[in-house]
Amino acid sequence: WLYAHDLRLTPPNWLWLKGVDRTLFYALHRANTTKGFIEGAGVVAVARTESEAMRFSLPCPEPCVEEAVEGLRRDLLSLGLIWDEPQPDRERKRRILTNWSLTDDVL
């Protein structure tokens, strides 16, 4: 709905995109409907963040997807759709993300 009204684009307007970048096509298409699609949620979240940044005259932040990816990974693990493989750097990233402060840790 957001994209159909704000950008005035309907799925036929970007049908050509399906052959070029199928994931982006479905993300934009699902952001325009009431049915859920995780990539569509990401598109909407980034658009809202950029809109708020512009409203307050702030620079647009870089999209941060690490927590979303980790949440999806855990969900897929719980369903048995993927297997957990050791990744030593993940624990360090988790500590940095959960124990950060504006004065101590700078990524």
Image (cartoon, helix red, strand yellow):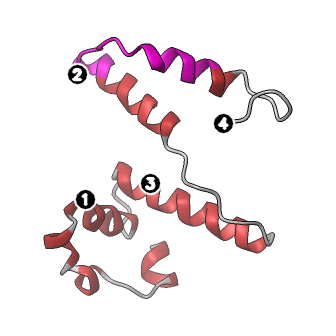
Residue under circle 2? 82
Check disc 4 and give the amino acid type.
Leu
Mark 4, secondary structure of its residue: loop
Q: Quadrant of residue 22?
A: bottom left
Q: CA distance from mark 3 to mark 2?
A: 22 Å
Residue at disc 1, secondary structure = helix
Q: Amino acid at mark 2?
A: Ile
Q: Report x, y in % for residue 14.
A: 26, 81
Q: Which amino acid type is shown beneath numbered disc 1?
A: Thr
Q: Is residue 86 above or below residue 69?
A: above
Which quadrant of the rendered structure holds the C terminus?
top right
Q: Nearer the viewer, residue 71 or 1?
A: 71
Question: In the image, what residue occupies the spot 32% across and 17% down?
Answer: 78
Residue that numbered label 1 is attached to: 23
Q: Amino acid at mark 3?
A: Ala
Which quarter of the figure has residue 56?
bottom right
Task: Say if 74 sits above or below 12 in the image.
Answer: above
Q: In the image, which residues are magenta?
A: 77-95
- Mark 4, other Cα within 10 Å: few <14 / some 14–19 / many ≥20: few
Q: How many marks?
A: 4
Tell me the residue that label 3 is attached to: 41
Query: Are the residues at dot 1 and dot 3 in contact (C-beta closer than 8 Å)?
Result: no
